[in-house]
Image (spheres, helix red, strand yellow):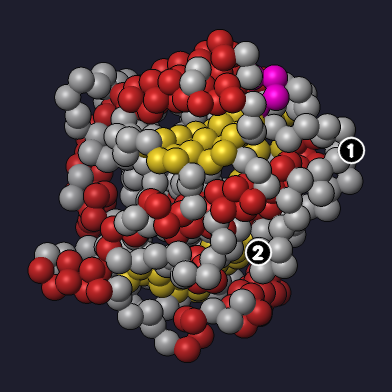
Amino acid sequence: MPTASHNARPNIVQIICHDLGRYVGCLGAPIDTPNIDALAEEGALFANYHCTAAQCSPSRGSIMTGRYPHNNGLVGLAHLGWQIGANEVTLPMYLNRAGYHTRLIGHQHEDSEPAMLGYQTIGSPKNDARTVATALHEFLHGEARGGQPFYVNCGIGEPHRPYEREGYDRDDPDTLEVLPYLPDRPGIREDLGGLHGLIWRLDEAVGTMRESLEASGLADNTLFIFTTDHGIAMPRAKGTCYDPGTGTVLILRWPEQFAGGRVRSELLTNCDFLPTLLDLAGVEAPPQVDGRSFLALADGDECYEPREEIFCEMNWHDQYNPMRAVRTNRYKYIRSFGRRPLVYMPADIYVAPAGEAMKEDFYCAVRPTEELYDLDSDPLEMNNLIADPAHDDAAWTLRTRVQNWMVETNDPLLYGDYAPAREQRERNESKPMDNGIPHC
């Protein structure tokens, strides 16, 4: 339940963008994001926050239900036929029961029918950053002024690919700083230049939305959230269980309750997002929710008991890519199922300049069944220690943790592969791609 200091339920404005990861200035990325950085200075920044799956729909499903993808049923992309289970309760449904008005603006990727997610009102699905910012302004200066607490989820499309878009600026590929986990190649630089332009547009919109909230007079008792679904759409990020794929930005700003400039390093998963918001709204999370509230961290309450580990998974994207992983503060252990390329790249990356630059590296070798990384000495996860006798104890411990987690959550992968959803099967039959098969 909320702490005693929470005298009134806050309004909630949630901004969730597409494929941003931690690529913002306040988390050390080499890009200018002044509005997002200012938001972090005014609120609580969670620097060790991860998604349950480094892909759009499954990660968003965990945000909406507080449950792992294999528990809530959303183990693939919504537009390819995957859905949250019919008996699942979503965040809007919980908040409706608590007396909130719930509204969706812009993008969602949890169901092909957004009405199934429980929002009381649904705005235009147009999801470019400027359009969503305008729609939020209209809501804040219209419906939101009725006195009922509200939750509005603003889904922004940027910086999802394609990176080549008319009307967007581009950074100079010859002068930008390359990603530390990829080699310095022209195709990677080219894509980064386009990515920067989309993030600049996103950052502009975040500033506009914050200004709209201030002008509405509702800012002091409104929780303003900025987050994303998973890592950037670059090789070795989106679609993997490495930190560039699972690591995501999360900022919570609530002037009436949270001191600004707080940076938390505790290990968190986006399964924890729903119970935290329910905690703020005075709603007890039911026992089937996999996450737990981290409200105490935002409050600065040191009584929070940190997690020792988080779990993540992959199942279906455009190809089948089953993995299970556990991350502690020191180690990452990844278990792969089946014969897959060394590093899988989703289709939007595979066909892009960055994907072309990495195909030979990633698709001429088969991924090992197990991977183990010492994050203290190898934060980029480059040196697989699974066969190193010096790390046998860590390997055994984490292997056991993953197995126990799968058993405890009755993971369907224990009983065999996931069959594709109907739309997934039809798409793969009509548009076969080789990005799921190791080849040279």
Instruction: Specify start and end residues of the magenta stretch as a single range.
Output: 219-223
Find residue 324 and report its horizontal and vertical position in percent: 51, 70
* Dominant secondary structure of the residues highlighted in magenta in the image: helix
- Residue at 44% x, 74% y is 336
Q: Amino acid at mark 2?
A: Asp
Amino acid marked by disc 1: Ala
Q: Residue at x 73, y 41 (%)?
A: 280
Question: Is residue 189 placed above or below 412 in the rendered structure?
Answer: above
Residue 126 lies, in percent from the top left, at: 29, 34
Residue 382 seen in the current view: no
Q: Residue furthest front?
A: 146
Left/right placement of residue 411 relative to residue 318 reads: right
**Front: mark 2 or 1:** 1
SS assignment at label 2: loop
In the foreground, 44 or 273: 273
Disc 2 or 1, which lies upstream in sequence? 1
Residue at 31 percent of width and 30 percent of height: 128
Q: Is residue 139 visible from the viewing direction of this image?
A: yes
Residue linked to disc 1: 4
Q: Is 287 situated above or below 8?
A: below
The residue to which callout 2 is attached is: 290
Report the residue at 19% width, 29% height from top: 165
- In depth, the one of 13 and 401 nearer the eye is 13
Pinpoint residue 288: horizontal percent, then vertical percent: 67, 69
